[in-house]
Amino acid sequence: MSNRTIAVLPARYASTRFPGKPLAKILDKPMIQWTYESVSRCPDLDAVLVATDDQRIFDTVVSFGGKPVMTSPNHQTGTDRIAEAIQNDSADLVVNAQGDEPLVSAQVLSRLIAMMRETGAEMGTVAVPFCKTDRDPQDPNAVKVVVDKKGFALYFSRSLIPYPRQGGVPVEPLLHWGLYAYRRDFLEQFVKWPMGTLENCEKLEQLRALENGAKICVLVTEVQSSGVDAPGDIARVEAELRRNGGVWG
């Protein structure tokens, strides 16, 4: 296996809340281009791919000089789509950079890659203290994670964890940020496992890894991204870009 690291951006056109989201314009460019360019600034990546099932997204990525890979329309998750996209690549480490994270930090990607190389973990992800965000820890859409003393995930939940019982020692909850890194052999195994009981309960795919005994290292950072979940989020992202002179990274 080669010592090669690639990032794959899963990008599908169909979305219940925001159809065509990857092609939505942010200032003068489609969102998938902003994300691709942000990820490409990471110096520790050998390649960046966009995994899609839609010809419109494929053609858009080609138009700005990116590298798209057409995948099956039948995948249930972005992880399944990534596993197909890397079949013809020799990478041993794969980063899942969500296609709707136009302001993703290249520095955070580098730190996540370094952590994976240093720890030998099968999987890695990122978290941010809630106090550094504008998110509500009580919001079930804001996924929480708790880690052990070595920085490995103990559990992910939509509920508030740890629970601040009266008289207990306060602990700053961590917001899970959906960036992932996988060792290739683990990724290929992961997508073959059936959905687990905990995953089916909370609808969090990463719980499948924990249920099967995998180790997930968690990079805790104060840097956060601005993901786009709904059309209303675009104005917020554009405002951040304008504050930075229309550039990012």
Image (cartoon, rainbow, N blue to C red):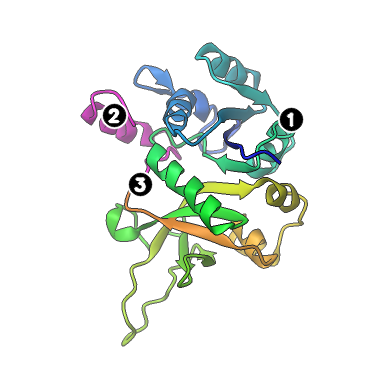
Q: Counting other residues with Cα less than 10 Å from the Cα at mark 3, is it few (<14), some (14-19), or many (20 or more)?
A: some
Q: Nearer the viewer, residue 12 or 92?
A: 92
Q: Which residue is at 42% across, 30% downward?
A: 41
Q: Which amino acid type is marked by label 1?
A: Asn
Q: Quadrant of the N terminus?
A: top right
Quick one: SS at disc 3?
loop
Mark positioned earlier in the residue sequence (3 or 2):
3
Mark 3–mark 2 CB contact (< 8 Å): no
Mark positioned earlier in the residue sequence (2 or 1):
1
Residue 101 in the figure: left or right of residue 136: right
Quick one: SS at disc 1?
loop
Q: Which amino acid type is marked by label 2?
A: Leu
Q: Counting other residues with Cα less than 10 Å from the Cα at mark 1, is it few (<14), some (14-19), or many (20 or more)?
A: few
Which residue bears the numbered disc 1? 88
> Measured along the vertical axis of the image, is residue 28 above or below residue 9?
above
Tell me which segment is drawn in magenta: 225-249
Q: Which residue is at 31% across, 29% downward?
A: 238
Which residue bears the numbered disc 3? 224
Residue 211 screen position, x and y as percent: 67, 66
Residue 243 in the figure: left or right of residue 198: left
Q: Which amino acid type is marked by label 3?
A: Gln
Residue 115 screen position, x and y as percent: 49, 53
- Corner quadrant of residue 246: top left
Residue 186 screen position, x and y as percent: 69, 52
Q: Which mark is residue 241?
A: 2
